[in-house]
Image (cartoon, rainbow, N blue to C red):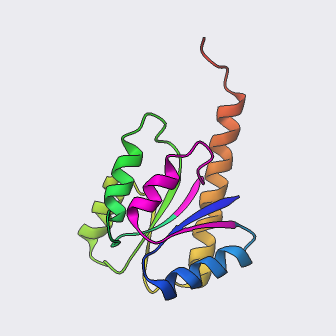
Amino acid sequence: MQVLVAEDEKFSRTILTSMVERWGYEPVVVENGQQAWDVLQKADAPKLVLLDWYMPEMNGLEVIQKVRSQSNSRLPYIILLTANAEKDDVVQGITAGANDYILKPYDRDELHDRIEKGKRIVESLLLVNKESPQMP
């Protein structure tokens, strides 16, 4: 399964990419919010997203809001990555449409668990969509 890694800071991006690969996922790596948005517009876009809040060109919240404004907004599963630890920040991220929220510096095991949770949810949604009868 592909995972979009959207992180502007090179060191963090490298670490995230390495972990995602080690866990058996295929990373699709971008450096800013506009690139993330562009990737998410593709028909074969990753269904799991690790999205940094603060990025150039378009921040993570803006990307989330654009994604969720589309009619097929149940996917992707978005995990927002940020150093913003205040309760209001968590609420703002979830209200924007993030499925999950993890604080930097993140714990490797916690991040892995949250990605696995996201994968289970995505697979469940894809299965439901596949089994649902299509409307004419």
Image coordinates for residue 13, horizontal then vertical, percent = 52, 80
Is 80 magenta? The answer is no
- Give the residue at the far top of this rendering: 136
In-front residue for pair 92/69: 69
- Residue found at x 36% / y 70%: 53
- Give the residue at the far left of this rendering: 88
Q: Quadrant of the N terminus?
A: bottom right
Image coordinates for residue 118, horizontal then vertical, percent = 59, 59
- Residue found at x 61% / y 51%: 121
**Residue 33 drawn above or below residue 133:** below
Image coordinates for residue 32, horizontal then vertical, percent = 41, 68
Image coordinates for residue 47, horizontal then vertical, percent = 59, 52
- Residue found at x 24% / y 68%: 88
In-front residue for pair 44/3: 44
How many circles with numbers are drawn on the protein? 0
Q: Quadrant of the C terminus?
A: top right
Is 44 magenta? The answer is yes
Which range is magenta?
26-49
